[in-house]
Image (tube, rainbow, N blue to C red):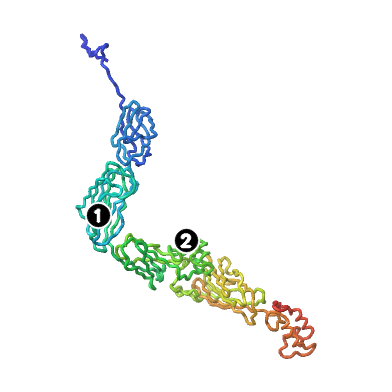
Amino acid sequence: YYLVATDGISSVYSGTPLVPHSVTVTNQPTLASVSPNNGPAAGGTPVSLAGTLFQEGASVLFGDVLASNTVVLSANQITCVTPPHFPAMVDVKVVNPDSTQATLLNAFGYEDTSVVLSMPNTSADYGTIVQLDLSAANVVGLRAADLTITFTSGVLAAQGATTGTLTVGWSLSANTATPGTVRLSLASATTVSGSGSLARVNFNVVGVPPASTALTISSATLNDGAITPGLSHGSFDVNGFFTVSGTVNYFVSRPVPGVTLTMAGGGTYSAVSDTSGQYSLADVPTGTYTLTPTKSDDVAEITAYDASLVLQAAAGLRTLTANERTAADVNRNSVVSSMDASYILEKSVDLIQVPFPGAGIVWAFDPTQRPYAPLNSNRTAQNFTAVLLGDVSGNWQPGMDLALPAGGDPKVPSATSASLSLADVSGQLGAEAVLPLYLDLQEAALYAVDLVLSYDPTKLSAGTVSLGSAAQGMMMAVNTQTPGAIHIGLAGADPVTAGGALLEIPFAVLGVSTSPIPVAFQRAVLNEGQIPANLDDGSVTILFSSADFDRDGDVDADDFEQFVSCASGPAVALESGCEAKDFDGDGDADQSDFGFFQRCYSGANVAANPGCAN
């Protein structure tokens, strides 16, 4: 180009059309921002670059590492994905195809947040020297670290430090001039990755037991802050011997003896709670422990009433406390349901044994464990609450006798009463006699019945018990596995409020008895004793054929001999003692009476029909 200046008369030239000035224009891009401006060291962060004069086909570099998926959206915007890089602040550069470029300094921070720095939890004796590691886990691309550790100067005195397993060959400066503080500075020309110790700090143990201190990582700067570590502080205890004590109470404030308390960790120590529920573990050395209570015996008072409470809770008719829910959830599935009630009712009659299916334990405790990390002093009031699974009502007592009487529980006074009566029935040898159990209820709500009945197993055999009209809708469990005993449990969500036949109990008549065979109450408890009950035993009387003179259950040759010895002929008076042979009641024992005898004859060991002579 050239310039011409004129005042209207003359002209002055700068350059000429033949020798013009020249102008060179260069398309130099600019980079104004990178968003987001930080991301993980593993790369993979989508970013957007803003600037000017970006060209199609431009490349993007993060600290001299090429980005991927670069797209030039316009002359003012590029998108790409960051490449991997060790944790650091890096420059971002855009390079156009014509080699023009723009750089934004410290534009993107590669970060690593998965790193964890930790100090140990440990102990040692007074007067010794210990070496404690400052450890790092999951570091990637570490090349510099500035760290401060604080502690109680009356417990430990720092003496110096050396490099750790991750930092072999690094430079290390340790400042221990300030009591209770160690400052560490580490650096290397190359990076390291992995897990291990950064530094090992030497301490004199100067505290007299019991003494302890926290080991706190009060500051940590890695790669100028590009690595953000999680911190796991430690602790140090001067070794000593300590006592742990407390009380185990039932969830209704009753002491529980016989609980084994076990401390496990730096050794194993145990004690058993006494009759007042108290325990003490003495001379336990410093260390990390877990205290766990266990008990599997002394199982009593899991009753049909407990099953009733669970049925009520499952139906939404009753709200249980937290401890009652623990007792009710016997299969430990975190749900109180009718299945739990079924298991409890089975246990109430000993059809199953504890632990309940799915439970794995007999007793539950709150808390389940007590951790000591560490144990470095005497611990008192380390108490536990005990719950016997299945005892929802909480009426368990230590050493309780399962064979409770029928009277009321003194802790639940009641003016109401009931009567339970077993009928007196008759039955034929070899046949079945059904014995009803009747309930007479006076102004009471009956939710549960626990029964144990006894009988002579050589004379009777219990059959399948069924509910009577008064107990319809109740759940029942029956155990007849022990000869001579019937265990029965009845439970309902809704109460029985009127009397009637509670049960129908069939017996097969097995053996001969000339007197009534007793069926008696051994245990009868209504609502766990809240309803006092009067009891009336029953019996089964065997019916004999009138021709069974020797009362052995059959009519055979022995009975025929007795008939013949008394046979008098027509119109001949009977001798004394022969009256039973006069079947037709005409005062003699003749051919007519023999006809009756023939109808009754069964043969030896064959039960005779009691009504054969009718």
Examine the rendered structure and indicate whether residue 118 appears above or below residue 367.
above
2 or 1: mark nearer the eye: 1
State the residue in front, 84 or 559: 84
The mark nearer the N terminus, 2 or 1, is 1
Question: Where is residue 526 drawn, in percent x and y?
Answer: 52, 72
Identity, as a three-letter code, of the amino acid under mark 1: Asn
Horizontally, residue 235 falls left or right of residue 273, namely left
- In the image, which disc is placed on residue 332? 2
Residue at label 1?
202
Secondary structure category for the residue under label 1: strand
Examine the rendered structure and indicate whether residue 44 appears above or below residue 477.
above
The crowding category of the residue bearing disc 1, from other C-alpha atoms within 10 Å (few below 14, some 14 to 19, many at least 20), is some
In this view of the protein, can residue 118 be seen by the observer?
Answer: yes
State the residue in front, 362 or 206: 206
State the residue in front, 124 or 392: 124
Horizontally, residue 160 falls left or right of residue 566, namely left
The crowding category of the residue bearing disc 2, from other C-alpha atoms within 10 Å (few below 14, some 14 to 19, many at least 20), is some
State the residue in front, 345 or 137: 137
